[in-house]
Amino acid sequence: MLKTILRLPTVKTESGLSRSTIYLRISQGLWTKPISLGGRSVGWPASEVTTLNAARIAGKTDDEMRELVATLECERKKLS
């Protein structure tokens, strides 16, 4: 399976959110934490961005989003 990591400019485009809003949502538990790509580079798995966008479109509440974020980050740890 192809795994793509999206950098911040692409995540901003895909989500329609600004950089500050993405990082605010991370601090609120409403968006997954970025993955370090080395140095000062970070990115997000494309599948997570797609899942988070679909959940928002579906009208998930903030509590449901927090559960989803926790699930996605737990699945991420299983892969390592």
Image: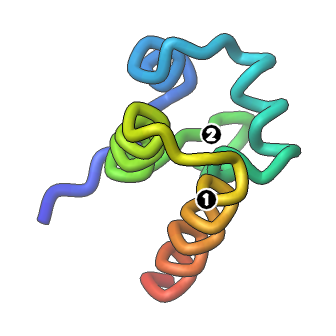
Is residue 38 visible to us here? no
Residue 59: % across, % down: 48, 38
* Mark positioned earlier in the residue sequence (2 or 1): 2
Please say if 13 is above or below 77. Answer: above
Q: In what element is the residue under mark 2?
A: strand
Q: Residue flagged by tag 1: what amino acid is it?
A: Glu
Q: Residue furthest bottom?
A: 78
Q: In what element is the residue under mark 1?
A: helix
**Measuring 35% from the left and 40% from the top, which residue is drawn there?**
54
Q: Residue flagged by tag 2: what amino acid is it?
A: Val
> On the rendered structure, is 26 left or right of 75?
right
**Measuring 58% from the left and 79% from the top, which residue is drawn there?**
74
2 and 1 marks in contact (CB < 8 Å): no
Q: Which residue is mark 1?
A: 64
Residue 23: % across, % down: 78, 31
Please say if 42 is above or below 66. Answer: above
> On the rendered structure, is 25 left or right of 18?
right
Q: CA distance from mark 2 to mark 1?
A: 25 Å
**Measuring 48% from the left and 78% from the top, which residue is drawn there?**
75
Residue 11: % across, % down: 48, 25
Instruction: In this rendered view, identify the residue nearer to me: 66 or 75.
Output: 66
Q: Which mark is residue 42?
A: 2
- Colour mode? rainbow
**Measuring 50% from the left and 29% from the top, which residue is drawn there?**
7
Q: Which mark is residue 22?
A: none
Tag in front: 2 or 1: 1
Residue 14: % across, % down: 39, 20
Q: Report crowding for label 1: few under 14, some 14 to 19, many 20 or more residues within 10 A (C-alpha).
A: some
Q: Report crowding for label 2: few under 14, some 14 to 19, many 20 or more residues within 10 A (C-alpha).
A: some
Quadrant housing residue 1 = bottom left
